[in-house]
Amino acid sequence: MTATTATGTGTAVTLLGLDGVTSTAELRDAPAFTRPAAPLRSRVAYAAAHVIPKPWAENVPGAPADIDWDATLAFRRHVYSWGLGVADAMDTAQRNMGLDAAATRELIARSAADARDAGGSVVAGVNTDHVDDPAIPLDAVIDAYTEQLHFTEDAGAGVVLMASRHLARAAESPADYERVYGRVLAEASAPVVLHWLGPAFDPALAGYFGSGDVAAASETVLRIIEAADGRVSGIKMSLLDADAERSLRARLPEGVRMFTGDDFNYVELIEDDGSAHSDALLGAFAALAPAASAAIQALDRDDAEQYRSILEPTQELSRQVFAAPTFHYKTGVAFLSWLNGHQQSFSVVGGLHSARSLPHLSEIVRLAGDCGALERPGLAAERWTSLLRLNGIDA
């Protein structure tokens, strides 16, 4: 069976099932999307971008990240070319999963400088993860957050105030979250975006904002935002719970945006309606920049039908990439980047290219082919075939 045979409808590839049985599927040609000639208007959209390691580097579990900066920054320019912003140094870039403190600082500095040169919009994650001690008191959490906040602002990036494992361990009540966030936000020189990352993405963050009950935690979030007196511009909500996102969104103060981080339900949450919708800050959009851009361009033209026709087919692919254990979605994002020619090898910081099975990746290939997410189907077929053969699969 030849995995790269051109056919009348696309390119044939071999797929691999959980039972080891192979089948054949067609990768259709990528849609002829057009890059925007003007800034996107109807939604604000950031793609949470991954980092690309050097193929020859010692990027193994526990080793410091050794990043291919040329490829990493070129990928960000690819995102900018489609009119999207970049959310950098977020969990997609492997914060708390292989991206060490030195690499994080260098990423923020390089990405902010490159965004200025490229005319792109960049925000970057601020956390407490440069502190090695796993348990620190609340005042030390405030100091750690403030250190990263000042560094990121000085680099010239906007700020996303990420959920902190240190804070999750140290806080004993919602009031502790309010005190920490209040002190840190008072140090911000410009409004920031908060980030509510759920336990599906990081189990260490269970019960964040002082409660495992989302409604109760939402009350704490609202108190933090209201007390910040304009220093919060938005919140990225990554709970994979569309109803909870809509509920909090409806109660946000005027001028505070809801950025969906829901990689399972982004199509409906971004569309909703003109008076109530979510903007986007999504890891999925790192793999789907052309489609995301084209869909928002459709909304700019008030063409909701075309928006859905472009973006709805991508939702099943995103759900596969973000399938449980969800925190290993970075593997799928990097895999699609490799298939699309944005990186030289299928490699992930910390050796996490091994975090997904061949059948899981095979389903990504199938779904990406179905929804047109493969920018160069011929190259994708060649690379996927090489990976199968390397693993002893006759393709």
Image (cartoon, rainbow, N blue to C red):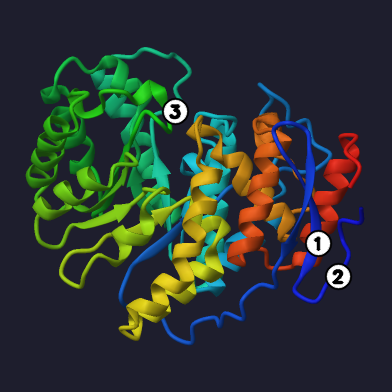
Residue type at the position of mark 1: Ala
Is the residue 261 above or below the residue 164 in the image?
Answer: below
Q: Is residue 275 visible?
A: yes
> Marks 1 and 3: in contact by CB < 8 Å?
no
Is the residue 116 above or below the residue 164 in the image?
Answer: below
Q: Residue at x 57, y 57 (%)?
A: 287
Q: What is the distance, in whole Å, between disc 2 and disc 3 at their CAs?
A: 48 Å
Q: Which residue carries the number 3 mark? A: 129
Q: Of label 2 and label 3, which has the lower sequence position?
A: 2
**Front residue of 89 and 393:** 393
Q: Is residue 329 left or right of residue 2?
A: left
Single out the mark in the foreground, 3 or 1. 1
Q: Which residue carries the number 1 mark? A: 12
Residue type at the position of mark 2: Ala
Q: Is residue 279 left or right of residue 109?
A: left
Q: Secondary structure at mark 3?
A: loop
Q: Of label 1 and label 2, which has the lower sequence position?
A: 2
Q: Which residue carries the number 2 mark? A: 6
